Image (cartoon, rainbow, N blue to C red):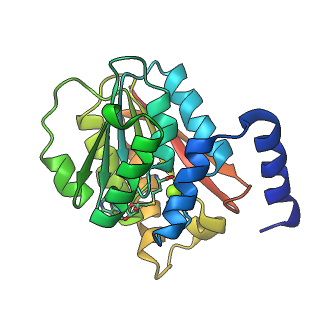
Amino acid sequence: MAAGWQAVDDYIAGKLLGDDEALAAALAHNAAQGLPPIDVSAAQGKMLFLLAQMAGAKRILEVGTLGGYSTIWLARALPAGGALVTLELEAHHAAVARANLERAGVADKVDIRVGPAAESLAAMAPGAPFDFVFIDADKQNNALYVDEAIRLGRSGTTIIVDNVVREGGVLDANSGDERIAGTRALFDRLSADPRLDATAIQTVGAKGWDGFVLARVR
Ligand code: SAH
Ligand code: DHB
Ligand code: MG
């Protein structure tokens, strides 16, 4: 990571994000419970919060909960009566997330479903549509998760996919890393999918050089 990236993220957080006991406690609890520190950064979490509010999201879907750090940011964006469904493979991660969400006072808005997200999604019938979807789990399945986001969304649904640049790794067409192959399959899907308008934005900061896809269902 370039020397200045973390320092500038610290500067941004100091100026614009403030101290947040629930979020700090969530990160500490994650570390104490052995979860990997791969949550979105604070500035990215606030961006998710702002985007969900800008979208007027009342129903949010998240794929990949970990300890619920991004979940807390997104749940805080919900209006009264709003709801968030978050999908997590690991029961231990989900248990840590539940405690973090309770401490943050948003547990009543969040439904954590444990198991492979592909199965949890397949079990979901289209009903009240999701307004906003954050995809941040196993990168191999990203194209499938976008398909499911469209099936469970509506015209205007916002879709964000994390980690689509990976220090430029996305350019490696012969990568043996199935996460890179999955990300390239996502771009192939998006480039050919008439159901979406999409872009991708590169980012630097506390998470290194990475990026996210931003899409809107037509
Ligand atoms: N969104 C979180 C970080 C998620 S890390 C945050 O920013 O705070 C990715 C998570 O996806 C991990 O907890 C991992 O266990 C989970 N995951 C991996 N494969 C999965 C799968 N097939 N289905 C659901 N979750 C999965
Ligand atoms: C990894 C996963 C993430 O979602 C992330 O934001 C950073 C790293 C990982 O699996 O290494
Ligand atoms: Mg991520």
- The residue drawn where x is 58% and y is 28% is 50
Quarter assignment of residue 153: top left
Name the one closer to the observer, 10 or 201.
Answer: 10
Picture coordinates of residue 206, whole percent (x, y): 71, 58
Left/right placement of residue 62 relative to residue 9 reads left
Say if 54 sits above or below 165 in the image: above
Picture coordinates of residue 131, whole percent (x, y): 37, 26
Q: Residue furthest bottom?
A: 176
The C terminus, quarter of image: top left
- For the image, the number of numbered tags is 0
Name the one closer to the observer, 206 or 216.
Answer: 206
- The residue drawn where x is 42% and y is 23% is 57
Say if 140 sits above or below 100 in the image: below
Name the one closer to the observer, 5 or 29.
Answer: 29
- The residue drawn where x is 33% and y is 57% is 94
Q: Quadrant of ligand 1?
A: bottom left
Q: Is residue 36 visible?
A: no
Say if 176 sits above or below 122 in the image: below
Left/right placement of residue 48 relative to residue 94 reads right
Q: Is residue 196 visible?
A: yes
Say if 70 sits above or below 163 in the image: above
Name the one closer to the observer, 150 or 57.
Answer: 57
- The residue drawn where x is 82% and y is 36% is 15
The N terminus, quarter of image: bottom right
Picture coordinates of residue 71, whole percent (x, y): 44, 43
Picture coordinates of residue 51, whole percent (x, y): 55, 29
